Image: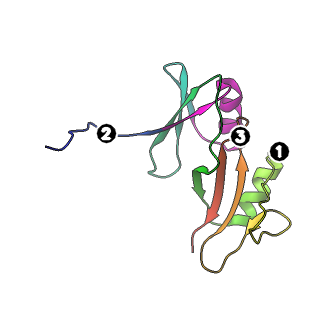
Amino acid sequence: MAMKSLGAFSGFAVRDVAAARSFYADALGLPVADDRGGLRLELPGDSGSVFVYEKADHEPAVFTILNFAVGDIDTAVDDLEAAGVSMLHYDGFQQDERGVARDPQGPAIAWFTDPSGNILAVLQPD
């Protein structure tokens, strides 16, 4: 017998909920609401929401936890940089000086972190 779920949602930890609120609301422009001691981020389009909770000993994952599809990667990077967000540069990836990887086998993508070190990305679908 399969599990009968009422729905599902994703979540991730941060070191400081107040810093996360500021970053996700102000730098990324997402609607953010208080939710049981954490935050609920409303994702663009019909993507749903993500629960963000505080964990004092939080260790960020070494992989991307949240991707944002954008219509124009260069405009998205401009907007993020204008909000004080720096793009990550990885060894082993062909990235331009702004941190955008433009692999012909996949979407153009750029990575950055939130204040807790969680890795996020903007990508322009093919």
Between 43 and 2, the residue placed more toward the observer is 2
The amino acid type of the residue labelled 2 equals Gly
What's the CA distance linking mark 1 and mark 3?
Answer: 15 Å
- What is the magenta range? 11-31
Q: Is residue 28 magenta?
A: yes
Of the numbered discs 1 and 3, the one sitting upstream in the chain is: 1
Residue 69 position, x and y percent, is 58, 60
Of the numbered discs 2 and 1, the one sitting upstream in the chain is: 2
Residue 75 position, x and y percent, is 74, 62
Q: Label 2's element? A: loop
Relative to 40, say whether 123 is above or below: below
Residue at (50% x, 39% y) in the render: 50
Residue 36 position, x and y percent, is 48, 19
Relative to 108, say whether 9 is above or below: above
Q: Mark 2 points at which residue?
A: 7
The amino acid type of the residue labelled 1 equals Gly
Residue at (71% x, 28% y) in the render: 19
Relative to 18, say whether 67 is above or below: below
The image's mark for residue 117 is 3
Q: Mark 1 points at which residue?
A: 84
Q: Neighbour class for label 3 at 10 Å: few (<14), some, many (≥20)? A: some
Q: Residue furthest left?
A: 1
Residue at (57% x, 37% y) in the render: 31
